[in-house]
Image (cartoon, rainbow, N blue to C red):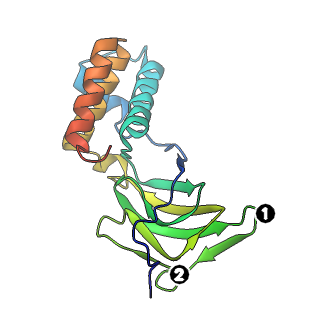
Amino acid sequence: MQLYERPDYRATGMNISREAPTELPVSISEFKTYAKISHDKQDSVIEAAIRTAEDMLFKHGNVLMLEQPVTIAYELGGARCRYPAFPVKSVDKVKTVDPTDGAVTELSLHKDFEIVNQQKTCVELNRAVESGQIVIELTGGYAPTPSEVTGTDAFAIQNLAAALYTRDNKQIQEQLKAGLDQIAPFNI
């Protein structure tokens, strides 16, 4: 397949959306063991802290703990689409949306586009989209199930959730930065 001849023609106007995971990346009981909490009185607060920690890592560092569908839309066309390394497990669909009538055209791998690096974080089209959207649907995340969120990843979630649980604003910022530095130092 012949890629678009101008390698510098990058798609712009990136918008990332996802469906928040239904499962927690770290269970309430794991967090309570980590934080040495022995009562059940604030389980809903703990759950909210864990969900917020996961969401903050995504919003501030493009980190996905659990595998989940992600949609990336480029509003201003282009031919080269770079996006964060969530990490990406698979590129499921690439399509274009015509701005005049909203018609969606699904593109074919090897015929209309290529995934050009091992991390699967760049799609190049064989032709530029001058106007309209380029939409990429992918699956990203570190672990397929919560039981596989371990080590540094679990520690980052637990530290950030603990800071949120205690409502310590200074610690929230420090733990967010530390977590992102540990998990995805080059992903921001």
For the point 48% across and 62% down, which residue is it?
138
| Residue 158 rendering spot, x and y as whole percentages | 28, 29
Quadrant where the image shows the N terminus? bottom left
Say which element carries label 2: loop
Of all residues, the one furthest to the right in this rendering is: 101
The kind of residue tagged 1 is Thr
> Any mark on residue 141, and which?
none
For the point 53% across and 55% down, which residue is it?
72
Q: Earlier in the sequence, mark 1 or mark 2?
A: 1
Residue where numbered disc 2 is placed: 112
Q: In the rendered image of this protein, does residue 142 appear above or below residue 98? A: above
For the point 46% across and 42% down, which residue is it?
23
Q: In the drawing, does residue 18 fall left or right of residue 100?
A: left
Q: Rounded to the nearest whole Å, what is the CA distance between mark 1 and mark 2?
A: 21 Å
Residue where numbered disc 1 is placed: 100
The kind of residue tagged 2 is Asp
Quadrant where the image shows the C terminus? top left
Say which element carries label 1: loop
The crowding category of the residue bearing disc 2, from other C-alpha atoms within 10 Å (few below 14, some 14 to 19, many at least 20), is some
Image quadrant in which you'd find residue 176:
top left
The answer, for residue 129, to whether it is visible in the render is yes
Residue nearest the viewer, comparing 34 with 7: 7
| Residue 30 rendering spot, x and y as whole percentages | 29, 32
| Residue 50 rendering spot, x and y as whole percentages | 39, 29
